[in-house]
């Protein structure tokens, strides 16, 4: 059975309701407030709802078989799927679009929400269009998305997004749901296999952190999150916070370090799980969210700073799946902590704090951001000394891990001259590279690439590339003239090799 409804608050609530959950209960949920805004005129501008009943959801079917089918209550196995469009049409016009070739009609498709036939926590597999993305280094950048193919009554529609669902408080708490969204991005790639929420929770451990049974699930700790990620075929790195905070009684991330980590690992496209402390009436509690994008500005043109500066500091907003609110929720940086939906809904507007960042990686990536940052500090000393009397704009670094194919695409589209392009494009490279780009204001001046698949104790430098031809011999001569000083300043056990075999050798390479 199919129904076509005009999008408004009442039809949205009725569509999200089921036989166990009334529209009034739906309207009391955080999700309803969020979807109303996200789908409304200030969001992605939905105008029409199409209801698809008797829908089989793979995720819910896994959970149904492992838990709900064993309940005395005869929970159904069929779901409802709600589709959203940014255009207005009638039932007759929709049926006509199904039977005729009308590509223009389907360009207005915004995505869907699956409604599970269970009490209260009914929002299941959800795939919705993102906010409009920016270009280059300015504007919104959604790096944790994949292409979903939606089959709707014989039509095949493709949409870029990241799957979302709310925790059901039985088989999947917030951490499990965060892992599930992250794995949705990489499912179908060379490594991870698809995992339903109940399977992810089982992968994490045999019992809950407090020793009680795993189901109903009370949540996962960081160690269990990492175990579940490992069971999927990925590995994880847990990034440590850098600031003491008495309000939550533990260390938290500064905005700068968190931005650096998000920017650094965005290049491989795997969403990052953040463990946060959210304000409540009685203090703070832990929660997990999945970050898949951010809004940033181009590197600024201010005066040079005394210390190392990062392009990542231009990130103003991040976008995260919060299973207690909705997909792509906006998170802003405050002087103290971050502002989330939890902050907005809290009576005193207390900040939210990030206490752990869990980065999921393919196993062949063995070099961490911290390994590269230590080398960048040495490079920064050299370039700041060289340019101290010439640069009138801020000097900053952009450190990212990239697929070598993506790096070569950047090189192809860059302003490098043909000989430098050819040298890099024809070079054999590992699949994963760390690339540290040096900027003066908004101008990209140099790239330094490193082998991300090697070991930290090796000399992992691969290429030093200069985008300003006149500068290359100047940098090379400056390093040679001050070699002994820079070896000491580099503060690395392989400083001599980085100076001689990496920098000087690369900068002196024939064109």
Image (cartoon, rainbow, N blue to C red):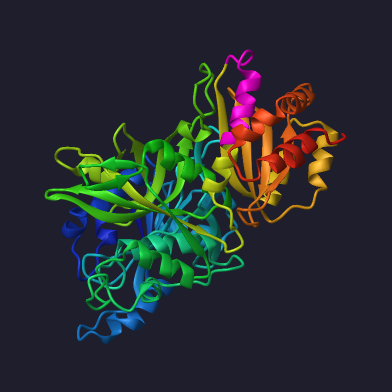
**Residue at x 60%, y 40% (from the top left corner):** 375
Magenta run includes residue 406: no
Q: Single out the residue that lies furthest toward the left.
A: 282
The location of residue 403, given as percent across then percent down, is: 65, 52
The location of residue 83, given as percent across then percent down, is: 41, 58
Q: Quadrant of residue 149?
A: bottom right
**Residue at x 77%, y 32% (from the top left corner):** 416
For the C terminus, which image quadrant? Answer: top right
Q: Is residue 168 above or below residue 353?
A: below
Number of callouts in the render?
Answer: 0
Magenta run includes residue 387: yes
Residue 218 appears in the figure? yes
Q: Quadrant of residue 217?
A: bottom left
What is the chief secondary structure element of the magenta stretch?
Answer: helix
The location of residue 265, given as percent across then percent down, is: 53, 48
In the displayed structure image, the side of residue 181 where residue 309 appears, left or right: right
Return the residue nearer the eye: 320 or 397. Answer: 397
Return the residue nearer the eye: 185 or 114. Answer: 185
Q: Single out the residue that lies furthest toward the right.
A: 510
Q: Is residue 439 above or below residue 47?
A: above
Magenta residues, as a range? 377-392
For the N terminus, which image quadrant? Answer: bottom left
The location of residue 362, given as percent across then percent down, is: 57, 62
Return the residue nearer the eye: 79 or 340. Answer: 340
Residue 113 appears in the figure? no
**Residue at x 27%, y 43% (from the top left corner):** 352
């Amino acid at each position: 059975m199919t129904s076509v409804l005009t999008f408004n608050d009442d039809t949205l609530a009725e569509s999200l309701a089921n036989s166990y959950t009334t529209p009034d209960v739906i309207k009391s949920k955080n999700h309803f407030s969020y979807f109303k805004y996200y789908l409304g005129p200030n969001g992605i501008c939905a105008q029409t709802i199409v209801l698809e009943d008797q829908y089989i959801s793979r995720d819910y079917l896994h959970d149904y078989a492992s838990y709900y089918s064993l309940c005395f209550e005869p929970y159904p196995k069929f779901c409802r799927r709600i589709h959203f469009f940014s255009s207005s049409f009638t039932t007759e016009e929709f049926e006509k679009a199904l039977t005729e070739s009308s590509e223009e009609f389907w360009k207005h498709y915004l995505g869907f929400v699956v409604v599970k036939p269970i009490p209260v926590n009914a929002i299941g597999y959800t795939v919705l269009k993102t906010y409009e993305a920016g270009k280059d280094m300015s504007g919104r950048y959604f790096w944790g998305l994949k292409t979903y193919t939606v089959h709707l009554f014989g039509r095949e529609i493709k949409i870029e997004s990241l799957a979302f669902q709310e925790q059901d408080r039985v088989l999947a708490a917030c951490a499990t749901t965060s892992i599930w969204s992250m794995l949705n991005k990489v499912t179908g790639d060379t490594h991870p296999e698809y995992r339903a929420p109940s399977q992810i929770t089982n992968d994490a451990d045999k019992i809950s952190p407090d020793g009680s049974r795993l189901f109903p699930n009370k949540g996962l700790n960081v160690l269990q999150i990492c175990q579940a990620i490992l069971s999927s075929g990925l590995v994880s790195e847990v990034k440590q916070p850098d600031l003491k905070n008495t309000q939550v009684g533990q260390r938290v991330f500064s905005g700068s370090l968190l931005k650096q980590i998000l920017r650094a690992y965005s290049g491989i496209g795997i969403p990052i799980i953040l463990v946060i402390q959210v304000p409540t009436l009685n203090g703070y509690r832990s929660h997990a969210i999945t970050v898949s994008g951010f809004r940033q500005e181009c590197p600024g043109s201010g005066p040079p700073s005394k210390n190392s500066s990062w392009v990542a500091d231009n990130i103003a907003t991040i976008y995260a799946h919060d299973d207690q609110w909705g997909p792509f929720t906006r998170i802003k940086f405050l002087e103290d902590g971050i502002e989330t939906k939890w902050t907005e809904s809290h009576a005193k507007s207390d900040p939210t704090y990030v206490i752990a960042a869990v980065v999921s990686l393919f196993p062949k990536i063995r070099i961490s951001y911290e390994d590269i940052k230590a080398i960048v500090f040495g490079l920064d000393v050299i370039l700041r000394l060289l340019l101290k009397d010439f640069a009138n704009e801020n000097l900053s670094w952009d450190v990212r891990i990239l697929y070598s194919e993506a790096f070569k695409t950047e090189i192809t589209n860059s302003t490098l001259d043909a000989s430098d392009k050819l040298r890099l494009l024809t070079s054999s490279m590992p699949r994963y590279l760390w690339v540290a780009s040096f900027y003066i204001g908004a101008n990209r001046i140099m790239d330094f690439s490193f082998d991300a698949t090697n070991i930290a104790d090796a000399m992992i430098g691969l290429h030093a590339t200069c985008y300003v031809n006149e500068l290359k011999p100047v940098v090379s001569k400056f390093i040679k003239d001050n070699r002994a000083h820079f070896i000491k300043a580099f503060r690395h056990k392989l400083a001599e090799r980085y100076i001689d075999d990496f920098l000087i050798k690369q900068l002196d390479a024939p064109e």
